[in-house]
Image: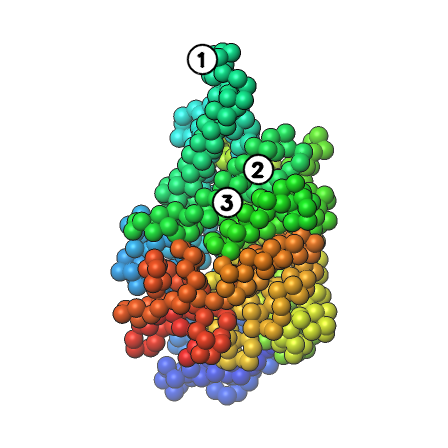
Amino acid sequence: MKIQKRDGRVVAYEEGKIVDAIHKANNEVEADDRASDKLIRTILDDVKKDGFDKEQVTVEHVQDMIEQHLVESNKYNLAKKYIVYRYQRSLLRKSNTTDESILKLIRNENKELAEENSNKNTRLASTQRDYIAGEVSRDVTRRLLLPEHIALAHDNGVLHFHDADYFIQPIFNCCLINIQDMLDNGTSINGKMIESPKSFQVACTVTTQIIAAVASNQYGGQSVNIRHLGKYLRKSHDKFMKQLDEEFGDTLTAEEKKKIVDLRVHDELKSGVQTIQYQINTLMTTNGQSPFVTLFLQIDDNDPYVEETVQIICEILRQRIEGTKNEKGVYVTPAFPKLVYVIDENNCLNGGKYDYVTELAAECSAKRMYPDYISAKKMRENYEGNVFSPMGCRSFLAPWKDENGNYKFEGRFNQGVVSLNLPQIGILAEGDEEKFWKILDERLELCFEALMCRHKALLGIVSDVSPIHWQHGAIARLKKGEKIDKLLYGGYSSISLGYIGLYETTYLMKGVSQTDEAGKEFALRVMRRLNDAVNTWKKETNIGFALYGTPAESLCYRFARIDREKFGDIKNVTDKGYYTNSYHVDVRENIDAFRKFSLESEFQKLSLGGAISYVEIPNLTNNLDAVKELIKYIYDNITYGEFNTKSDYCHVCGYDGEIIVNEDNEWECPQCHNKDHSKMNVTRRTCGYLGENFWNSGKTKEIKARVLHL
């Protein structure tokens, strides 16, 4: 007989648990009111008989049967104790859980929130306000909005219901802003009309206003394709030329006019890009952080404004290399915008016309860790010949055609994400593949149910909840009061199944990682099974389900922490303190960068709803040639890649020396005095550990320093 737990897990029936529960209740009543061993045996036999011809029964059904037997046997006091105990447990599961977390937040003692999002400063009153609302949302979501077994599955690390802190609101995850429509046809922000810009500088200002407004009405990232600004740089050029013609006529030669116009255009270009960079990093959205925005840098030969686009991309890269000044006047690496650079035939460092732009991108990567790189060649292979930006959260949309048969990506969005803890399945399966696939299928059904909760939360929402998205062009141009439902179906928007820890799962089931052929074969089978699931859901529901290599690094620690508490230290699995993200190979594997990209490219093909791979290069700033070689390799081998560095490195100011431990026992950059652990790499040579850093809290004393080895 099988028992279905409240969190959705199906486990073997254990009658000893019933015996223990009744004995505990017996201890609470007088001797005459206790259940005899004979009565207990009768209860056990009846439960077994009831479940004999059933695949499974629920734990609630078994408890109901126990209560019924106790009452029928006139064990009223015992039944009362048992019923009260069940009621108290139910109340506990549904009780308000926000008081302690909110008070800790106000006192700046909630380390989990502080580390959850390095872009949000929990000391700021405005950010605390958003976090307080988020804690209330989490509580209401868990107690009232989600089915109890889904909430418990989240608590037990079976799955992760992302962004519960925003689930109470009718908003979605991330999107590709249709910036072309909004700039060309005008938009409205806060009830004020904004007409199509007449110059590049104004277009840049309007773009940042749009980004801030969009970011304030959703919880994920946004992406903007820079190519749409090329048109406005041309407008500025033409405007300057017209002014010179009107003012000086034939008194200036064509060459003189060109020189003057070029100087003015360059000045406007620099000012416009600076506007984007500083506006994005100084504006605060209503969720208490800078807009989580990505700029997509693509040089498309078919773009009528390709030369202007190239100028804009070069200026963005130059300004990122320089950095922005912090409050102490030190040039630092801004957190936003994220940069994604497309490598194509015209700039793949193989004699292309725009190779010089890629040279600049490589220099930027060496100095500032950005941009990330997308291979147009590999992307076309996987996405029906298309090249397009990831959404701000790094998830990808599936190709979709409008009524005219044209592919459309901008103006589309992601409804939300639920991620699956793969290593926990491997732990429970204990090396038994038949058991593994059975548990996986059961948990995929849980994930489907949780994802449908996200979808249903958006059904019936009217466009008025976020005019910038639904009425004024960021996503659509719907009428006031019109429902958004049609945008939730047919694959127009995506909804994502994430996954964590394929590396550990493979190790648990095969004793080797996916770098070994036996492990690789198993890991690819797991990926195909996940793919089959989302494709089946897509056909059954007409909703754009997709498999997504979850980028939430904090989730790698959460799942590992839960499993370590449940199952103890398991070598190369829970003992590390983290799980590897999605399909990634663990950083501790002895594998070179080229082989890592080559191996992980096979998994990217099976994770088309989002996938990014990274490699680590020692002393990145002194290895520009290595960066260029890897850029070339990305173009031919993998869709999406980025670089990290193994040495001590401060991503804020670019310092490439040893990070010190200050008087407060915290890591600190000696150059810019950055103490933000998320913006530095620290590798202590004493043990050679190159894994993820983590925060360690003692039982009696809070340890504030980041440690690598204990």
Q: CA distance from mark 1 to mark 2?
A: 30 Å
Inspect this view and state whether residue 636 appears: yes
Find residue 549 and report its horizontal and vertical position in percent. Answer: 59, 58
Callout 1 crowding tier (Cα within 10 Å): few <14, some 14–19, many ≥20: few
Query: Which badge, 3 or 2, comes first in the chain's sequence?
Result: 2
Secondary structure beneath dot 1 equals helix
Query: Which badge, 1 or 2, comes first in the chain's sequence?
Result: 1
Are the residues tagged 3 and 2 within 8 Å (C-beta)?
Answer: no
Q: Quadrant of residue 536?
A: bottom right
- Identify which amino acid the numbered label 2 is placed on: Val
Callout 3 crowding tier (Cα within 10 Å): few <14, some 14–19, many ≥20: many
Q: Nearer the viewer, residue 433 or 673?
A: 673
Find residue 430 and report its horizontal and vertical position in percent. Answer: 63, 79
Instruction: State the residue position of label 2.
Output: 310
Instruction: State the residue position of label 3.
Output: 317
Q: Nearer the viewer, residue 395 or 65?
A: 395
Q: Nearer the viewer, residue 392 or 560?
A: 392
Query: Which badge, 1 or 3, comes first in the chain's sequence?
Result: 1
- Identify which amino acid the numbered label 1 is placed on: Glu
Q: Nearer the viewer, mark 1 or mark 2?
A: 1
